[in-house]
């Protein structure tokens, strides 16, 4: 087992196109770290450089204490599982899992012991003699993970391993991966674009955009205190509501901002580095917008545009006169009476509002 240290890692595929622009990251031994970011931001490139499948243009990669830039992929002690599992169709599950060990000249008895142990962990013992074509998608993916486990790697790399599976199977596999990590306690790096996978699997999440790390932190830390607008709108589904606004007042422990049509909202943040008149963006997550009770004269008048009943919750898309953005509210399931055209009033609780400066950097939230 080993941690990883990345020091100013850069990657150019061609001379003038830099896809990884200097990444510093410390991954502790045994940690489960999830990489998220939009398509094309460099997640797979990072994984492939760590695995040794892609050359590192500059910077240093340490696996444990060993500088590993020039160590061959097969000698790094890293196993990678991809989205496409590419099993050998003519080989049994057993042989698929044993293949890399055979190539490495591992003694037969040890191969047998490792394959059987991995099969046990993955609850596949009864499938060992089958060929891949007689397996379901989820079972095939488990064989691919088994192939990685038998190698006893110091680090596992998973690049969107579940994206080919349907939703129910993805959930099962997610739970299994979590258990696998608890059991093996091996360092795991995991790429996904699935919010829930990221939030549930990760000890820490790394958000990438355009080859740059935007923020690193525990899932809840990132959700509650995104450091910038990119992270704020990337994590969370439906995403955070954001409104361009203007700072009109600075008070002890809160910032007063004005939205169009003179609507004022407060945010419990330390906006000391800003000044009145600055352009800012205020953000509030769908679950934090409050619906005022009927007859409540306070709150901001709004109109319901659309409701989506998801069984456990209701999503209401609302419009506030003068504000262009469509606003999403997440409400309890018993709000099924809400319908198109309803006039409502809503509140943005001060303690739940986040505030970002003109560059998109968050102001520090103050707990009340
Ligand atoms: N072999 C390659 N040659 C040239 N450009 C590449 C190669 N692989 C990836 N890229 C480019 O590098 C960028 C990052 O790609 P990738 O790491 O696959 O992103 P992600 O996995 O986050 O979707 C993209 O712009 C992609 O087009
Ligand atoms: Mg990728």
Image (tube, rainbow, N blue to C red):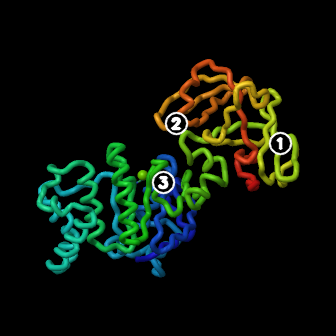
**What is the residue that sits farthest to the top in this orientation?**
341
Q: Is residue 320 left or right of residue 188?
A: right
**Residue placed under numbered mark 3 in the picture:** 198
**Residue placed under numbered mark 2 in the picture:** 313
Q: CB at mark 1 closer than 8 A to ligand 1?
A: no
Residue 25 at x, y percent in the picture: 55, 67
Nearest the viewer among 24 and 142 is: 142
Mark 2 residue element: strand
Q: Of discs 2 and 1, which sits in the foreground?
A: 2
Q: In this view, does 20 lie to the left or right of 190?
A: right
Classify residue 256 by image quadrant: top right
Q: CB at mark 3 closer than 8 A to ligand 1?
A: no
- Give the vertical position of 208 relative to 246 (above or below): below
Which of disc 2 and disc 3 is earlier in sequence? 3
Residue 262 at x, y percent in the picture: 83, 29
Query: Mark 1 Cα within 10 Å, few/some/many (few <14, many 20+)?
Result: some
Q: Is residue 340 left or right of residue 282?
A: left
Nearest the viewer among 307 and 33 is: 307
Query: Mark 3 Cα within 10 Å, few/some/many (few <14, many 20+)?
Result: many
Q: CB at mark 2 closer than 8 A to ligand 1?
A: no
Nearest the viewer among 295 and 82 is: 295
Q: Distance between the residues labelled 3 and 2?
A: 21 Å
**Residue placed under numbered mark 1 in the picture:** 256
Mark 3 residue element: helix
Q: Distance between the residues labelled 3 and 1?
A: 34 Å
Classify residue 87 by image quadrant: bottom left
Q: In this view, does 233 lie to the left or right of 154?
A: right
Q: State the residue at coordinates (19%, 72%).
A: 103
Q: In which quarter of the image is the N terminus?
A: bottom left
Residue 156 at x, y percent in the picture: 38, 67
Mark 1 residue element: strand
Which of disc 1 and disc 2 is earlier in sequence? 1
């Amino acid at each position: 087992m080993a941690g990883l240290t990345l020091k100013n890692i850069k990657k150019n595929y061609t001379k003038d196109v830099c896809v990884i622009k200097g990444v510093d990251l410390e991954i502790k031994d045994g940690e489960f770290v999830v990489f998220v970011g939009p398509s094309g931001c460099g997640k797979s490139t990072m994984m492939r450089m760590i695995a040794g499948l892609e050359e590192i243009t500059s910077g240093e990669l340490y696996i444990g204490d060993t500088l590993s830039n020039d160590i061959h992929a097969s000698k790094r002690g890293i196993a990678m599982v991809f989205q496409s599992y590419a099993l050998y169709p003519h080989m049994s599950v057993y042989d698929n899992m044993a293949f890399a060990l055979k190539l490495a000249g591992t003694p037969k008895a040890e191969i047998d012991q490792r394959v059987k142990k991995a099969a046990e962990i993955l609850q596949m013992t009864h499938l060992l003699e089958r060929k891949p074509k007689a397996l379901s998608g989820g079972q095939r993916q488990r064989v691919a993970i088994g192939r990685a486990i038998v190698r006893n790697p110091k680090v596992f790399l998973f690049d969107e391993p579940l994206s080919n599976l349907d939703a129910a199977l993805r959930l099962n596999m997610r739970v299994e991966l979590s258990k696998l990590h608890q059991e093996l306690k091996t360092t795991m790096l995991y790429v996904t674009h699935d919010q829930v996978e990221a939030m549930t699997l990760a000890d820490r999440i790394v958000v990438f955009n355009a080859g740059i790390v935007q923020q690193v932190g525990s899932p809840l830390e990132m959700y509650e205190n995104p450091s910038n607008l990119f992270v704020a709108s990337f994590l969370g589904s439906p995403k955070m509501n954001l409104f361009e606004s203007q700072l009109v007042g600075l008070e002890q422990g809160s910032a007063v901002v004005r939205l169009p049509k003179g609507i004022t909202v407060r945010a419990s943040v330390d906006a000391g580095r800003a000044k009145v008149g600055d352009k800012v963006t205020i953000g509030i997550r769908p679950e934090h917008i409050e619906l005022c009770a009927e007859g409540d004269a306070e709150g901001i008048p709004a109109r319901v545009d659309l409701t989506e009943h998801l069984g456990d919750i209701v999503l209401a898309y609302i419009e506030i006169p003068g504000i262009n953005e469509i606003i999403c509210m997440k409400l309890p399931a018993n709000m099924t009476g809400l319908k198109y055209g309803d006039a409502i009033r809503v509140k943005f609780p001060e303690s739940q509002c986040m505030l970002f400066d003109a560059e998109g950097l968050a102001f520090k939230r103050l707990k009340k």
